Image (cartoon, rainbow, N blue to C red):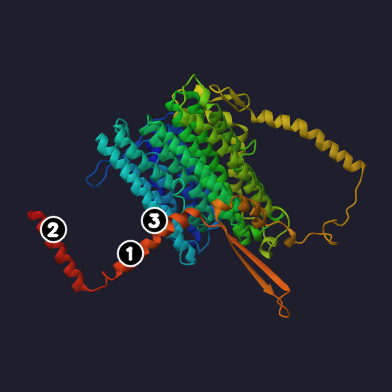
Amino acid sequence: MTGIEAGLLLQLGLGALAVVTALTAAPSLRSRAVGILCTLIAVTGFLTGLGAMLGATGGLRISMALPMDPLVLAPDRLGGLFMLIVSGVGILVSLYSMSSTRGPDASRTAWVAMPMFLVGMQLVPAATDSVSFLLAWEVMTLGSTMLLLADHASRATVASAGIWYSAMSQLSFFFILAGFAVLAAASGGTSFSNLQAIEPGPANVAFVLLLLGFGGKAELVPLHVWVPRVLPEAPSHVSAAMSGAMVKIGVYGGLLVCVRLLPDGPAWWGIAIMGVGGASALYGILQASVSSDLKVLLAYSTTENMGLVFLGLGASMLLRGYDAQAAADAALVAALLLAVSHAAFKSTLFLGAGAIIHATGERNLDRLGGLGARMPVTAAAFGIASLGAAAIPITSGFVAEWMLLQSLIHGGRLDGAVVSVAASVAMPLAVAVVALTAGLALLTFVKAYGIAFLARPRSIEAADAREVPPLMQLSLALGALFVLALGLLPGPIAALVAHTVSSNPGAAVQSVGLGGVSLPGIGAVLDPIMLVVLSALVAIPVIVSIIVSARRYPHRTVDLPWGGGGSRARPRMQYTATSYAEPLVRVFDDVLKPSRDVQVTHVAESRYLVERVRVEQRVSDVFETRLYRPVLNLVQRYGIVVRHVANGSIHRYLSYSFVALLIVLIVVSL
C-alpha cells in the first residue's frame, strides 16, 4: 500500500468515524470529539497532498455495489496542491470550531456535516474521472448545505440563504455535468486521461459549460449572487471554510479544464476568462468597499480575489497560445499563489470576524470600534490578514499580485512571440484592472480594520468586548503566521507551486537569496527579506530621532482645537464605515445604483425645528436586481398559474395520467 493510498483510506475512515461520533456522542463531548477528528482529517489530507505535490504516486480504487465503474482516487501534483490548500484551511477551521460551537446547544446536524464537507473537498482534487469527480462534488455540496442550514430554525434569513445556495449549487452542477457529458461523448470515456483529444466544436461547447459551472462555485460574476447571502449568514468558521477552501475547488475545476483536459484552446478562451475574471475583480471590490457589514465585505472581497485568480489563468492561456511560455508560466504560478494566499488571509479574516461577533454580537462596522485594546490577539491577526488582502509588502498577497503584474506587463514582448492585437489590448487592460482593484482593496481593508479596531467604541457591546478563548486565538495566529511566512519567504513555496503546472519549472520561477523569488524568463526579482532590511535601515534613524526629540523637548497636552471646547471627541464625531465609503459611492454611482432613504423628525413645537435626521443608504447587487429578479418573478407568476392545475384532486390527476398514456400509445403506434 502506497502512502497516497493509505492517506486517502485514512481520511475516509476518519470521516466515517467522525459522522458516527457526531450522531452518538453526548452533547457535552460532541464538539471536542468531532473537532479533534476533523483536525485529524485535515492533517491527513495535508500530508497526502504534500506527498502528491512532491511526486508520490498511488491511489485508491473503490468498487461500487451499483453497476458502474469503480471510483479511482489518485491525486497528481496539481490535485495535491489543492488538497494542501483545503486541508490547511480545515486545520484552522477545526481548531476554531471546537471553541466557537461547543456545549449542549451545538448542532448535531452541523457536526455530522463538517467531516462530510472536509472529506468531500479533499476527494474532488483526487478524482481521476468525471464520475468520481461529480460524486465527490455532491458530497462537498451536501455537507456545506447542511452546515449552512443547521441554524435555520433560529433565523429566517438562513433559510433564504440556503435556498439561494442550493439553487446556485445545482445550477453549477448541471453545467459541470453537461460539460463532462460533452467531453465523454466526444472522447468515448469518462477518465480524464481520455478527455483530451477531441474536436474543436465539442471542445468549445464543453469549455463554455464547464466555465459556467466552475465559475459559479468560484464566485465569478454573474453567478456570484449566492455569496453576499450565504457567507454572512453561515457560522463564521463555515464561512471561513467556504471562502478559504470551497471556492478553491471551483478554481481547481477551471485549472483542470484549461491546464489538463483542454490545454490547447483558442485565443478567445483566454480572453473570455480574462474578461470574466477582470469584471469579477472590479465588481467584487467595489461592492466590498461600500459595505458596512463586515461579513458581506469579506464575501464580496472573495469575488474580487477569485476574479484575479481567473485573470491570471486567462492570461496564461493567452500567452501560451502565442509561445510566450515564460510569461505564461509566471502568470499561472501567480494565479496559484493568489489561491494559496487567499486561503490563508481570507480564512483568517472570516475567523476574525467570527471572533468579533463572538465578543460583541455585532457585524455592523458602524457599531464597532476600539476592539484593538480589548482584543489584542484578534486585532493583530486580523490586521496581518488585512495587509495580505490589501497586497501590502512582506505579506502573501503582495508576492502573488507582484508576480501577476510582472507577467502581464512583460507578457506582450517576450521570447520573440508575435502577439495578436487582442492580446496587446488585453494585457494593458488587465494591468489597469489589477492596479485599480489593489487600490480599492487597500481602501476597503483600511476601512474594515480602522473602523472595527481603532478609535472609540460606538456601542455598549463593543465597549464590553473581551478576547476570545485560546483555541480561537490559536487558529487566528496560525493563519496570520502563514500570511507572513509566504510574504517573507516566497521563493521555496513559489518554486514548489511551479512544479505542479510547469513543464520547465526552473525556467518559470526560482528561489534566490534568503527566500526571495526570481522570474528568469522575465528578468524580475523580489527579495522581501532585503526589503525589510532596507526599510529598517531607513526607519530606525527616524524613530531614534523622534524619541530623542520627545525627551529633549517635553510637550504638554491641551484641548483639541477642533473639539469645540471638548477635550475628547465623542463616538458620534468619528467616521463610520458608511461615511468613509460615501465618496466611492458617489464616484461609482452608475455601477452601484445606491438607494437612499432620508427621514426627518421635527420637534413637537414647530415643524421648522429638526430634532433628528436619519439617512439610510443601501447598495444592492445589480446582477440580482437586474438579472435574477425578473427571472424569479416570471417563475413565480408561472407557478401561480400552474397551481390551478395541481389542485389536489385525485380524479384530475388520474385523468392527466390517462391522457398521457393515450398520447404515449398513439406515438408508439405511429
Mark drawn on residue 194: none
Label 3, secondary structure: give it: helix
Q: Nearer the viewer, mark 3 or mark 2?
A: 2
Residue 489, x across and y down, in percent: 60, 31
Residue 273, x across and y down, in percent: 44, 38
Q: Nearer the viewer, mark 1 or mark 3?
A: 1
Q: Are marks 3 and 2 in contact (CB under 8 Å)?
A: no
Q: Kindly identify which residue carries mark 1.
A: 638
Q: Residue at x 13, y 62 (%)?
A: 661
Query: Which residue is at the front of the view, 199 or 467?
Result: 199
Label 1, secondary structure: give it: helix
Residue type for callout 3: Ala
Question: Is 319 left or right of 596, judged from the image as shown?
Answer: left
Residue type for callout 1: Tyr
Residue extending farthest top: 416
- Choose the circle earlier in sequence order: 2 or 1: 1
Q: Are marks 1 and 3 in contact (CB under 8 Å)?
A: no
Crowd around label 3: few <14 · some 14–19 · many ≥20 (10 Å): few
Residue 203, x across and y down, in percent: 32, 35
Q: Kindly identify which residue carries mark 2.
A: 664
In the rendered view, would you say 153 is above or below 206? below
Residue 286, x across and y down, in percent: 57, 49
Query: Which residue is at the front of the view, 228 or 113?
Result: 228
Whole-angstrom CA distance, mark 3 to mark 2, is: 32 Å
